[in-house]
Image (spheres, grey):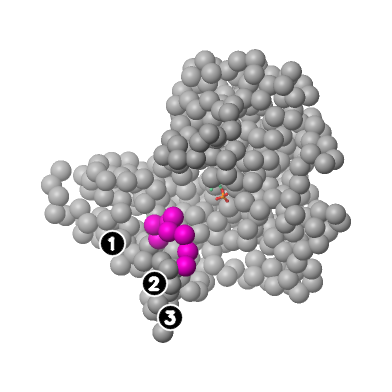
Amino acid sequence: MTDWVADEQQYLFQNYGRQPIVLDRGEGTRVWDTEGHEYLDFVGGVAVNILGHAHPVVAKAAAEQAQTLIHASNLFYTKPMIQLAKLLVENSCLDRVFFCNSGTEAVEGAIKLARRWGLDTRNGAHEIITTIDGFHGRSLGALAATGNARYREPFGPLMPGFHHVPWNDLDQIKAATNEKTAAIMVEPIQGEGGVNMPAPGYLQGIRDWCNEKGILLIFDEVQTGIGRTGSLFAYEQEGVEPDIMTLAKGLAGGVAIGAFMARESIASHLVKGDHGSTFGGNALAAAAGYATVKHVIDEDLSGRCRAASDRLMARLRSMEDRFDVVTEVRGRGLLIAVAFSRDCATDVMDACRRKGLLVNNVRPNAIRLMPPLNVTDDELDRACDILEEAIAASTAAVTK
Ligand SMILES: *Cc1c(COP(=O)(O)O)cnc(C)c1O
């Protein structure tokens, strides 16, 4: 029998710390490993599988498109990308879409667009202010934007032109703004940084500052977009509209895709020849994306996400009361972190997995839950039962 773990260790770069199971098959919120163990999947491909695994809507759209036309390039028009673009524009505050293949590429495109706009309208302004603990991707441009020195430092020199300021500190944004500033880029909720919520008024304050200074507001909604936080886009619940927005993770229900969107007055600065992607907007990914987003809208899965969130949050908050080690439950919709008083997230994650629940140790002292938007009440309750047992088991020996 193939030893998949040994082969992985022999043949792949060893840059990931993987949980020690080989996932083989999924259905809805459940996945099975190669040994036949069943798990509730609250990682969801890192906030990607918004409809769960093997959802018939996504599977059918992808399969039918694969048998029709997978890829034709951007030298031609194809139908699915036009359908998906129209759907996104009609359901957002933005006017145009560029398709790419990942969140990182979406951020790269947003940075290029901001620079292009700055060149045309602000005397070559090109600097972008981002936040510490913000995550925008791993390519050299997106990495320069990312507010995590551990990720950046081994790969210098990075692209210049970024200022990292503390999250939730509007004054520091103001202090970092100068005549070279083109944009401020933030996640509406910091995802990879540990599910860090914006303080009330913070995002509105950034919007007002951008208006005052005539600079762009970029929301990186790669993780928060497509219903994840209980509205199609997270900006809706903040009542704050961006000028540019990036999307990826959930956009095609598991198929690789990315996109950035912008207002017409900004998008018009990206002219023929300025940007491109061979695979971007390919018919397979776009068909899966169209089916996914349409299903989320038609079935009001953002609403289902809010109801599921209320149920999950109530249980998690009760754990906050009952376990000394649980210090905070934070998040919105189905992007939630449970924080601990000490660095036991890996122990809790491992204990959960052994009991049949997959979670992610987003910080040494916090786990992150990202179930599909259509997760059932039963699945939420079962996951909470397991999480309680795991917290009790992995923290029992330690007195606070
Ligand atoms: C995941 C993520 C990215 C990077 O997306 P990839 O698809 O991994 O390239 C960028 N921004 C945010 C907010 C993310 O959560």
Would you place residue 23 above or below residue 156 in this image?
A: below
Circle 3 packing at 10 Å, graded few (<14), some (14-19), many (20+), is few
Local SS, label 1: helix
Along the line of sight, the residue nearer the viewer: 18 or 400: 18
| Residue drawn where x is 43% and y is 47% of the image | 336
Q: Label 2 sits on what residue type?
A: Ala
N-term-proximal mark, 1 vs 2? 2
**Image quadrant where residue 271 sits:** top right
120 relative to 301 in the view: left or right: right
Which residue lies under the disc numbered 3? 2
What percent of the width, then of the height, locates residue 305?
A: 52, 52
| Residue drawn where x is 48% and y is 43% of the image | 191
329 relative to 143 in the view: left or right: left
Answer yes or no: disc 3 within 8 Å of ligand 1.
no
Which residue lies under the disc numbered 2? 6
What percent of the width, then of the height, locates residue 357?
A: 37, 64
Q: Label 1 sits on what residue type?
A: Ala
Q: Please provide the residue range marked out in magenta.
A: 11-18
Q: Label 3 sits on what residue type?
A: Thr
225 relative to 386 in the view: left or right: right
Q: CA distance from mark 3 to mark 1?
A: 26 Å
Q: CA distance from mark 1 to mark 2?
A: 23 Å
Which residue lies under the disc numbered 1? 351
Would you place residue 92 above or below residue 292 in this image?
A: above
Judge depth for marks 1 and 2 and give the one in front. 2
Circle 2 packing at 10 Å, graded few (<14), some (14-19), many (20+), is few
Q: Is residue 15 magenta?
A: yes
